[in-house]
Amino acid sequence: MNLKPTLSSRGHTWFDALAGQACSLDTGLPSVRVADGELNREITRFIAVVPDPNNRFARARSGEVGVDEGWQLALQVRRAITADRDCRRRSIIAIVDISSQAYGSNEELLGIHLACAAAADAFASARLAGHPVIAFLVGKAMSGAFLAHGYQANRIIALDSPEVLVQAMSKESAARVTRLSVSDLEQLGRQIVPMAYDIESFARLGLLRTIIRHIDADRPTSHDVARVRGELTDAIGDARASAANLSSRLASEEARQTRAASIEVRRRLAEQWDAA
Amino acid sequence: MMIRQSFIEMNARERAAALLDPASFRELLGPFERIKSPWLPLQGIVAQADDGVVLGRGLIDGRSAFVASIEGAFQGGSMGEVSGAKIAAALELARRDCERGRPILPLLLFETGGVRLQEANLGLAAIAEIHAGIIAVREFVPVVGVVAGVVGCFGGMSLAAALCTRLIVTRQARLAMNGPEVIEQEAGIGELDAADRALIWKLMGGEQRYATGFADDLVDDDAAAIATAVRWAVAMGVEAEPRSRQISQYMARLAAIDAQHPPTPVALRRLWQTDPVA
């Protein structure tokens, strides 16, 4: 049986373009690709979750984060932390093209919530240990899968593409839970910025560092790849020069507008925290 | 004989006060502050003055603590921008205090369906910040979580529960990443019948979660018993290798699972029984 991934995806495309094959690490899990490549002449760990039609868990064959993927992400990030304990902390790039976490009763039984928490924990720990962690959105960044793979990053950057989507839940599930139709939800997304799925709306929340425009997301040219490498390098430099927490997500002009309530809560809570 | 007082029947504010030392609860950003959701009124939904999270400071066994108690009766305990920011901000301030040598114990009372879909991406972002906050403060002090019921703990907040140093559940608690309705919607009724309540409790009920090591304590629906469990959890202190860092153990456990013939919930209890020596 050929376990080499055969499904094409943005995750594969950008992993290959940025990391190359030569430095790939064998994770033993085809759905999690890891390589120690190079960016700006520095060792950089690239990590992508990709489809694996032979995944032993049926609900994790299309690039979802399942139980195996969550723990594998945790392992691969923690190995970088351990390796760099006494030297310059390498950057970690999470290439994000994930439709969702795996939805299944086996997944719940086996604790997918903990597997995804372990991945989030590892990325956050890497960030706190001084590794610049960059989430690079090339496709879907959905729901709990994004919490596991990318949302703990120091900086988030994204390609400008209609297929790059960020949201808490698929339209179909959100419709069922809210008892609205999909078209009603789409209409709401045009009025209520956080309910939209597209990357331009996400950028208005102030959570994103950069949208990289005019790139062929499916067949990037060498010029496209060079531009992305430049943006990643800039984001890494920015992360190295800033606090290891997520405070940059509240500092942008967009955040001051759209996340004004998040800022106000923090300001007023700090005032009351130590009052008698 | 002490009369048992149901914890589940309490609202979020009563729960918060019940678990702190008597008369030590001091609410922060309370309803009179009127920091409400800016997004719900745009959708014709009445906002609540505390946005469904009761935040307060107080004492646990005489030690400085804060409690964040989610009100399951408001919008299913869902995390919106404000409710999520209240929890994240408290965790951030606790970390700051810990760094300054003034440890403060975080106590999180989960009763939440996860992201509030009317605030969608801002709820998800706040949940990521809650995760970051728990991970950052957990180095200094134990973060204690409680899932009591009736709502349970779902979505991104199930990851927050998993990140707690110690997690206390009751038999009325449910803990899962994907709620039954979402699994049925995404994977079909053949994967999971959301109406099959018995199966759902076997999969994600508090007793199962405790028996398979996803929770540290199983207590009765009794405010005094839960308060005692919280003190026990605090006394255990910081964990060098919390559950979310036990990578080799969980990978070995999963490697032994046959995905084609997965164990039943009962069989998994035997396989993953919490080993006190481990």
Image: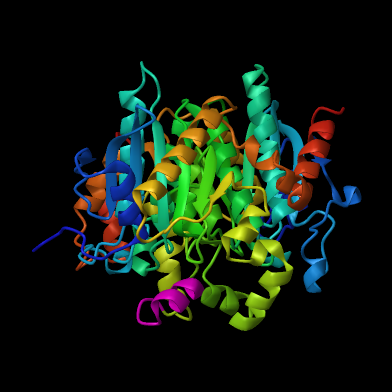
Does the magenta-highlighted stretch encompass residue B181?
Answer: yes
Q: Quadrant of residue B4?
A: bottom right
Residue placed most toward the observer, B184 or B120:
B120
Q: Quadrant of residue B41?
A: bottom right
| Residue A190 screen position, x and y as percent | 69, 71
What scheme was used to colour the molecule? Answer: rainbow
Q: Is residue A135 left or right of residue A268?
A: left
Question: Going 78% across and 66% down the picture, which residue do you hit?
Answer: B40
Question: Going 29% across and 62% down the picture, which residue do you hit?
Answer: A51
Q: Is residue A29 left or right of residue B201?
A: left
Height in image: B186 above or below A81? below
Residue placed most toward the observer, B256 or B269:
B256
Question: Going 26% across and 46% down the picture, which residue do you hit?
Answer: B251
Q: Which residues are magenta?
A: B180-192
Q: Is residue B258 left or right of residue B247?
A: left
| Residue A213 screen position, x and y as percent | 53, 54
| Residue B111 in sight | no
Question: Going 86% across and 28% down the picture, which residue do you hit?
Answer: A275
Q: Quadrant of the C terminus of chain B?
A: top left
Does the magenta-highlighted stretch encompass residue A162?
Answer: no
Q: Is residue B252 left or right of residue B124?
A: left
Q: Residue most toward the left?
A: A1
